[in-house]
Amino acid sequence: MMEFIEQIRAIVGEKGVLTGDDVRSRPSTYWNHQPMQAAAIVRPASVAEVSACMRQCHEHGITVVPLGGNTGLVEGTACEPDQIMLSLERMNTIEQVDEVSRTVVVQAGTILQTVQAKVSEHQLMLPVDLGARGSCTIGGMIATNAGGFGVLRYGMMRERVLGLEAVLADGTVVSSMNGYLKNNTGYDLKQLFIGSEGTLGVVTRAVLRLEEHQTAETTALIALHSYSQVTQLLKHLDRALSGSLSAFEVMWGDFFALNTGEHSKLESPFAASYPFYVLVECQGNQADELRQRFELALEHAFENALLEDAVIAQSAGERASLWAIREISEPEERFFEITIGFDVSLSIADMDSYVSKVQGGLAQLASDATLLVFGHLADGNLHLTVGLHTPVDREAIEHLIYEGLKEYGGAISAEHGVGLEKKAYLAISRQPAELALMRQIKATLDPQNRLNPGKIFD
């Protein structure tokens, strides 16, 4: 292996290869803080270097695990001691911002927050946003088809990618850097790499679709008595706000109570407790008009018994405080000895029934277990956290969460991907013919199975 690493070093230079303590100083994955086990971290600085490295690995039978910001939540970057980690962290240039076409050309190792800051200088925005914005990379977001907070209005990463460049397992460069919306010239090959979790190719560059910067936003936290109110409120606000609704984040009562209770630095703005809470946000460019329309929509909702109480943020600080209730995780860490997180998708109409059945099954598995539920409900995505004070068979809990989706035709992953963590349950969400075709694509693009093997499926 050392001889091979020297061959790679000749391609990427001294700064392009990390070994020994420089590798072990990094965590294995987001959840696993044990030292990274790769034989080396290879850090090419150009597409040509990526291609040359992949070609060498292909010829020598070396396995490659692509690495973005290492913020994935499904063990998609787990690496063995005889494998190479390929990081594009040195490929972090924003090559072009086109104000007219509203696009940005960016290298895959660029941090999301860096891109957001750059395009905002041109009064544009990259609306895909998530909590890991300060460390996740564009390439990693494409490889995992990242979602986040604004999917209701702006879509997932797939909707942002107009063109991309990728390097295959044998070093072949596939470049389709189109900067326009319409291109019906045969197969849309970029779709193969979006959401493929680094198993089909290494994304090196991309053309991303931007939006005009929204200068005004209005945010409210709403309390509700029933799930029926939640779904009716979503329909009412989506219609009344005429496309400006950008977030509809729902929190079940237990989740809200923990995040505003004695184990939290945050407090509830409501005097009473409720079974459901919704964090709503709309964006536009006419602040007064947007706020007036937003307040009128909430007033009509109250008059029609679609909500019980509401608090509208009066400043950027108040907005941040409301969002903090949704995003904070420290109360879980303080209160529970063990937490197990899940990310699922299913029909909005089925969510309340599904949650109730999971709660019932969980009570039978562990008397001290608590189910915390929140998520981007408007796009069909729920996040579930099982909090425990004593150890319980994790596999039994996973079986409960994932097998319970069968009845509703749900997906075991909404936005986190499959990786190692969920691949045993992939057949719940995919038909045999789909899985067979996925394997055929993998075998065609990576016949030696050297590119992030074992992820998604064996």
Image (tube, rainbow, N blue to C red):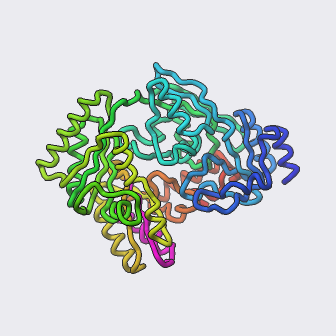
Q: Is residue 313 above or below residue 182?
A: below
Q: Is residue 138 above or below residue 209?
A: below
Confirm whether residue 183 shows in the render: no
Quarter holding the C terminus is: bottom right
Confirm whether residue 336 shows in the render: yes
273 and 153: which is toward the camera = 273
The residue shown at (54%, 61%) is 423
Residue 217 locus on image (x, y percent)? 33, 36
Name the quadrant containing residue 142.
Answer: top right
The residue shown at (36%, 30%) is 215
398 and 341: which is toward the camera = 341
Q: Is residue 179 left or right of residue 79?
A: left
Count of numbered circles on the image: 0
Residue 397 locus on image (x, y percent)? 46, 72
Looking at the image, which residue sits at the far top? 100
Q: Is residue 306 magenta?
A: no
The residue shown at (52%, 25%) is 179
Looking at the image, which residue sits at the far left? 303
Residue 137 locus on image (x, y percent)? 58, 42
Quarter holding the N terminus is: bottom right
Q: Which residues are magenta?
A: 381-409
Q: Is residue 107 above or below residue 414?
A: above
Q: Is residue 144 left or right of residue 12?
A: left
The residue shown at (35%, 60%) is 260
Q: Is residue 403 magenta?
A: yes
Residue 47 locus on image (x, y percent)? 70, 34
358 and 315: which is toward the camera = 315
Name the quadrant containing residue 32.
Answer: bottom right
